[in-house]
Amino acid sequence: MDYQNLFEKFNTEGKLHLPGAAISFGAIPWSKHPTFDGVELKHIVTAKETEGQFSYHLVRVAPGKAIGSHIHQTQLETHEIIAGTGVCISNGVELVYEPGVISILPMGVPHEVKAGPDGLYLFAKFIPALT
């Protein structure tokens, strides 16, 4: 399977279906991460739409770049790897990231994500929502 094309399908043709509405992922702009170089986010579902209950974000990390060590004190975070490779260091344990992997990062646990030579492409979900 061509995982890079799968990620691009989410990026350009993906849709969120809600009762009475559909949100096209292609219409949502990419944003540079405010802290980490080479990391971009597409905010698919935000705290505003869910009254703070959860949020979904499409994430791309450029080859060799990283989301440095940080902690979400009030959110559980999940990662669903769509394309590329890398590692996540969660509470000192290295998790291999490749397509098909899902990881759960409990609130209050330090973690970082490092992209491999082909970059890393994932869905990040936060409960409650990232604000």
Image (tube, rainbow, N blue to C red):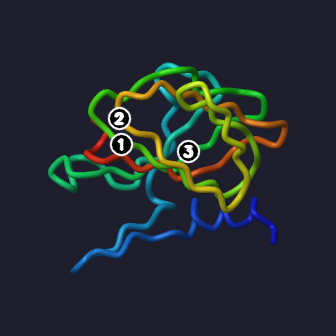
| Amino acid type indicated by mark 3 | Val
- Residue 59 numbered mark, or none: 3
Cα distance between the residues tagged 3 and 2:
19 Å
- The residue that disc 2 covers is 107
Which of the two labelled residues, at mark 1 and mark 3, occupies the earlier sequence position? 3
Name which residue lies at 15% across and 51% down: 51
- Dot 1: within a 10 Å radius of its alpha carbon, few (fewer than 14), some, or many (20 or more) residues? some
Percent coordinates x, y for residue 14 in the rendering: 52, 69
Helix, strand or loop under label 3 = strand
Tell me if residue 105 comes above or below residue 58 in the rendering.
above
Name which residue lies at 72% across and 43% down: 96
- Residue 76 numbered mark, or none: 1
| Amino acid type indicated by mark 2 | Met
Percent coordinates x, y for residue 94 in the rendering: 67, 34
| Left/right of residue 26 with respect to residue 6 in the rendered view | left
Q: Nearer the viewer, mark 3 or mark 2?
A: 2
Name which residue lies at 70% across and 44% down: 120
| Left/right of residue 14 with respect to residue 101 in the rendered view | left
User: Which quadrant is the C terminus positioned in?
Assistant: top left
Nearer to the camera, 107 or 39: 107
